[in-house]
Image (cartoon, grey):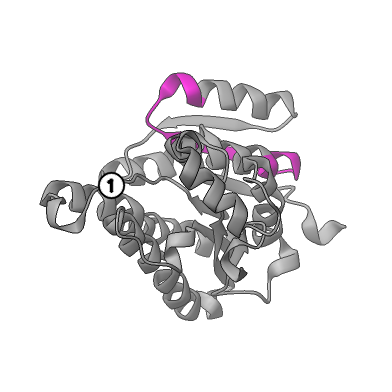
Amino acid sequence: MEEFSLQGEVAFVTGGNGGIGRAIALGLARAGAAVAVAARNDTKTGQVCKEIEALGRRSLGLTCDVLNQAAIADCLDQTRQELGAVSILVNNAGVAHGGPPEAISESDWDQVVDTNLKAVFICSQLAYTHFKEHGRGKVINIGSEYSLFGSPFVLPYAASKGGVIQLTKSLAISWASDQIQVNAIIPGWIDTAMTTPVRNSRALYESILARTPAGRFGEPEELAATAVFLASRASDFITGQSIAVDGGYCIA
C-alpha cells in the first residue's frame, strides 16, 4: 500500500476547518501528510489542527482569505517555512448565493465567482513553484453537482463550479509534463452546514433522496478516501478527471 502513503508530503487545504474541507484535511493527515489548514475562522482552524496533531502529524493553522492574493502567497510561504514545500493543494473554499437570475447583484456574482473559481486558479498558480521545488505535485479541486447541471436558483455557484471543471482540465494539460496531476472531486449532496437549508426543506430533501440511488445524503468523511487517492502516487497517471462521490445522483 506504499503507493497510497502520503508520508513526507505537505498538504495545503483551503477552507479546511469545516465540512468537506475538514474531513479531507484529516484524511490526508491519517495517510501521513503534514497539513496546513487555511481558512478565515481561527477558532475552528485551531480545533482541526489539534485533531491533526492528535493523529501524530504536523499541522499549521493559517488565517487566509482566498480573495486576497497576497494573503495566499504569504500563507504558502509560511507553510514552506514551517512544514516544507507544498506538494498537495486542495482547493475547497467556496461560497454560494441564491435567488432568481434577474435579482442577482453584481457584488454577489463577483464574490461567488471570485471565491469559487478565480481563487482556485490563483492558489494553483502560486503553488506551482512549490510543486516544481518538490519535483511533482497534486491539485485537487472541489466541484459540485452543479458543475454538471444548471440551476435556476444558485446561478453564480453553478457557473463557477462548471468553470472549476474546465480549469481542472486545462491545468492538467498544461502541467502534465511537470509531473503535476490536477483532478476534481464532485461531491453529491453531503451533510454539511451548507446543505442544512436543503435538509430543512422537506419536499426538496425528499426529492433528492428519491433521485439518489444510495437513498441518503453523504457524510464529509466519505470524500476523504478519494482525496487521499488523488493526492497519492497511486494516481500518478490520472489527470484532468472529475470523480463524482454522490451515491449515484448524477447518473440517475
Residue at figure coordinates x 54%, y 60% from the top left: 186
Residue 214 image position (x, y, % from top left): 71, 54
Residue at figure coordinates x 51%, y 64% from the top left: 132
| Quadrant assignment for the N terminus | bottom right
Residue at figure coordinates x 53%, y 31% from the top left: 60
Is residue 244 rendered to the left or right of residue 56?
left
Residue hosting label 1: 98
Residue at figure coordinates x 78%, y 52% from the top left: 5
Q: Is residue 2 one of those drawn in magenta?
A: no
Q: 56 and 27: which one is in front?
A: 27
Q: Magenta segment range?
A: 27-45
Where disc 1 sits, the SS reads loop
- Disc 1: CA contacts within 10 A as few (<14), some (14-19) or many (>=20): some
- Residue, far right: 1
Q: 200 and 193: which one is in front?
A: 200
Q: Is residue 39 one of those drawn in magenta?
A: yes
At label 1, the amino acid type is Gly
Is residue 97 rendered to the left or right of residue 210?
left
Q: In this view, does 30 lie above or below 1?
A: above
| Quadrant assignment for the C terminus | bottom right
Is residue 97 rendered to the left or right of residue 215?
left
Residue 172 image position (x, y, % from top left): 50, 75
Q: In which quarter of the image is residue 251?
A: bottom right
Residue 42 image position (x, y, % from top left): 42, 22
Q: In the rendered image, is residue 189 in sight? A: no
Q: In the rendered image, is residue 150 in sight? A: yes
Residue 130 image position (x, y, % from top left): 49, 56
